[in-house]
Image: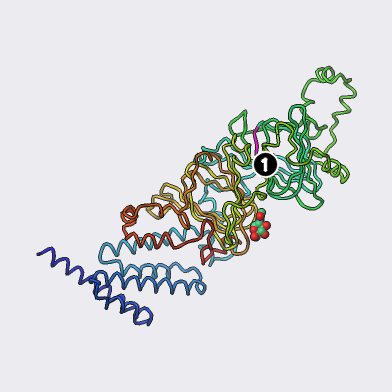
Amino acid sequence: MYAKSKLSVVILILSVAALFSGLAFAKQDPELKQCSHQCRVQQQFDEEQKEKCVSKCEEYHREKKERESVKEHEFDPDRKLRECQSRCMGQGQGEARQLCRFRCQQRLEREHDGRWEEEGKKQTKEYKEEHEEEHEEQEHNPYVFEDRHFSTPIKTEKGRVDLLAKFTQNSDVLHGIENYRLAILVANPKAFVVPNHFDADAIFVVTQGRGRISMIHEDKRRSFNIETGDIIRIRAGTPLYLINRDDNEKLFIVKLLQPVNRLDQYEVFYGAAGGKPESFYETFSIEILEAALKTSRDKLERFFDRRGEGAFLEASKEQIEAMSSREEGGKGGGIWPFGSDSKNPFNLFKKRRPSKSNKYGQLFEVDADEFEHLKDFDLRVSYANITRGCMNAPFFNSRAIKIAIVVQGQGYLEMVSPGSGGRKSGSSYQKISSRLRPDTVFVVPAGHPFVTVASINSNLEILCFEVNIENNVRYLLAGEGNLVQQLEKEAKELAFKRRGAEVDRVFGNQDEEFFFPGPRQQRSRDYE
Ligand SMILES: *[C@@H]1O[C@H](CO)[C@@H](O)[C@H](O)[C@H]1NC(C)=O
């Protein structure tokens, strides 16, 4: 009896409060007033249901107003906080409402943390620059690598090689890929990269340009023309050389390397080279060379002279033409070990069709089923082309670790990382965010949900190496095929503390698959 009367008092207070907040809004907007009225006159609703219905009206109204105001307002934390907290009116009384208001504050702080330039916005330009630097230092993020994380072991007029720092250089969170290195080779038009070999297995991906690569395997030479999208597997120690066949365009090759002698370091050896780069032949004693090559000391000293410009030389048009047209250059030539059954190279974009495609983006994927050389690496190579202003579905890989490099365009990344790194929030997760621009490398560990968003100005193109791919499952967190849709009704209700239908409405609303239109309000300032 007592309990019952207490309950009705609570309901009374609740409904008065809700009514009050409802009225406050209703005064301003006839549509909302109408909606709330409809709730209150529903015969079959009890009081609680009526109030729930009213708060739905309010929620809808607020969202609509927010959508309308998105374009008009600059980011204004105070306004956002007020708006968010006003929503707590419909959330009951006392503790519940306080908790709701507190959450608003937390959420806003987290959002605020993610905006690199926001704080400096109103400051002078100088202060802003200083501030950004400071901010970047503070927010050192072990998953993202930018220009300053590359070294340039080779740099000549004709080209260069940029080598990314070890993945574990500054943090141990990426131990899982410590035996991989990433490098970018850039060869200028008509450059010839002198024969060399290295103590690492490698996958090369051509991200731009037209070239020709030659490899020596045992007593055979295999040469073929390469172009954008080609994936080439290089066995450790295979002597190879390259040319950029194009007169105007640079040749870009992204290399994923797996050292064989040392865990996280490899060496390049130049043999068939005279002088500069230094040929390792010269390292032997001259008596050894005399005997081995059956040539006199004088001749040898003149032969290995010190002329030369380094690892990248310029080839003449005639040389390029001659090398490019040799017959064995045809793809799929079938000389062992590159037999016709295992085409090498394999082109990412010449597959029958992308594995995901709609007007918001395309995803190309190649795994060991199609290109069996990837098996030894336990690797999948993929390429996402996200339409400007769009995003990919948030997802996580069950086992694979994704090593991604931005090939073109701008945008940003958000990733969930465990551990309460948020300085102010008491959350058990940390939001890792970063702007993305060409050559930004980011790593997404297994199990970590993440999303990438293309800027409104350009498509965002990302090349990915997903290692540890065997038995990997990609779990989508939104859109067609998302994992919440797989839960039983009861599990949904228990997990989300909502009616199953309500859960379905939220998780079934996005009916695109994998690529979606991006956030309405983009942080355009962040990637200019
Ligand atoms: C990415 O998409 C754009 C627009 O559809 C297209 O122009 C571009 O060639 C695509 N990039 C690749 C590498 O396919």
Residue density around tag 1, few if under 14, some if 14–19, many if 20 or more, within 10 Å: many
Residue denoted by label 1: 204
Comparing 78 with 501, the one in front is 501
Question: Does the magenta portion include 203?
Answer: yes
Q: Is residue 258 left or right of residue 244?
A: left
Instruction: State the image coordinates of residue 384 (x, y, percent, origin top left).
Output: 59, 53
Kindly identify the residue that appears in the image at 67 percent across and 41 percent down.
204
Q: Residue furthest left?
A: 1
- Depth check, front residue: 208 or 181: 208
Q: Position of residue 377 (x, y in %)?
A: 59, 36
Residue 44 shows in this picture: yes
- Relative to 112, residue 323 above or below: above
* Residue 157 can be seen, yes or no: no
Which range of residues does the magenta coloring cover? 200-204
Q: Can you say which quadrant of the picture contains the C terminus?
A: bottom right
Ligand 1 visible in quadrant: bottom right
Q: Secondary structure at mark 1?
A: strand
Q: Is residue 134 above or below residue 368?
A: below
- Residue 122 located within the stretch drawn in magenta: no
**Is 500 placed left or right of 465 in the picture?**
left
Q: Main secondary structure of the magenta part?
A: strand
| Mark 1: amino acid | Phe
Name the residue located 66 percent from the left edge and 50 percent from the top edge.
349
Question: If the image is split into quadrants, where does the N terminus sit?
Answer: bottom left
Instruction: Where is residue 153? Give x, y as percent.
Output: 70, 40
Above or below, 498 against 224 in this view is: below
